[in-house]
Amino acid sequence: MAGEKTEKPTAKRYSDAREKGQVAKSSDFNGAVALMAAAWIMSYAGPYTISSMYGQMKYTFTKVLSSPVALRPLSLDNFNVLMSSTIQSMVFLMMPMMLTVLVAGVLSNLVQVRPMFSIQAIFPKLDKINPLNGFKRLWSTRSLVEVGKALLKMSIIGGSGSIIIHNHWQELMTLGALEVPVAWVAILKVVGEIAQWSCILFLLAGLIDWRYQAWEFEKQLRMSRQDIKDERRNSDGDPMMKSRIKQMGMKMAKTRQLAAVPTADVVITNPTHYAIALKYDPDIAPAPVVVAKGKDIFAQKIKEIARENNVPMVENKPLARSLYPVVEVEAMIPPELFVAVAEVLAFVFSTNKGRRLAAQKRAADHAAKKNRSSKLLEGGDA
């Protein structure tokens, strides 16, 4: 169907989407990495954290609340001091884990989207608060996928937790007979094992979701063939306008060539298909220079101007065919054609001495006139 988006997005399409803050990113992958970071830090700092929390609670209940002062009615000031001390201890103990999770979240985002900054991403979009659009998103395929992912995550946590708790069931039943620190360590061991397997399964699910998000993002950015044509037109310019500019440039170039034909020493013809106008001035260039060249209709125009200005024309089919494809306008002839062109010029100069002398006289008169003008200007300045 016409306009069907079946083509892969171009690099510009990806770049434009990135400028708008639209990238393929998996929140499940971020959650999995953050969970792994939390589990890792807890595996090292967990026992110390539990022991410190136990010490803080023991101090609170044995030293503070059981002291003779604490037996009096608890004042608001004493309660504030007690809560402040407890909260500070808790924050100090939880800070390593919170910082680790924060760093892990930032790194997981950088891995997925690389460093980027988009102002457009922070602008509010009215379509997001449109109830009709919200209802459509609620019953869209993406919403169903998200529901499926949520059920899968719940199944992962519930399934892994159930299996691990079943394996440690006898051990957990004896926790009541253990001291509190030992019981906490045993509980932490079971929780750590649950977290370990949950992290592994979550990471696999996050990697799968990352690839799914990339596929979904590419699907959203797919383009039709007309979109690709429009993008190329906008990037490179309108083809019609480029063609028009090219035509104008060629027309101006041909006009300059025709204006230079009267100054040529000879026009070499095919005789009907090619015409190459040559000029030789040793003071300007060491070899003859092509001042104009043309094919078919433009060749006839060059010959017409040459006749009007009495420019000699020499019919030499091999030389014309050799010159036309290899020499550009305002360029010298190649060395391999020096001999052939020299023979033509020698013939022209020998049979057109009067025109050559007249051209030299005009050049001398022009130089003399220029010198007189310079002297007059110098005298005026003096």
Image (spheres, helix red, strand yellow):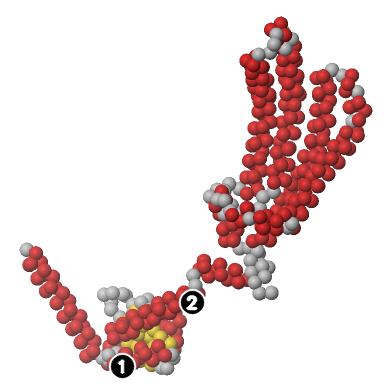
**Which residue type carries mark 2?**
Met
Looking at the rendered structure, the number of numbered marks drawn on it comes to: 2
Q: Nearer the viewer, mark 2 or mark 1?
A: 2
Bin the neighbour count of mark 1 within 10 Å (Cα to Cα): few under 14, some 14-19, many 20 and up.
some
- Residue 240's mark? 2
Which residue extends farthest front? 73
Q: In which quadrant will I find the N terminus? A: bottom right
**What is the quadrant of residue 304 in the picture?**
bottom left
Bin the neighbour count of mark 2 within 10 Å (Cα to Cα): few under 14, some 14-19, many 20 and up.
few
Q: In which quadrant will I find the C terminus? A: bottom left
Which residue extends farthest right? 170
Secondary structure at numbered mark 1: helix
Q: Nearer the viewer, residue 94 or 353?
A: 94
**Which residue type carries mark 1?**
Arg
Q: Nearer the viewer, residue 218 or 132?
A: 132
Horizontal side, residue 12 vs residue 180: left or right: left
Residue 267 % position (x, y) = 35, 88
> Which residue is labeled 1 in the image?
307
Secondary structure at numbered mark 2: helix
Residue 30 % position (x, y) = 69, 43
Q: Is residue 113 above or below residue 198?
A: below
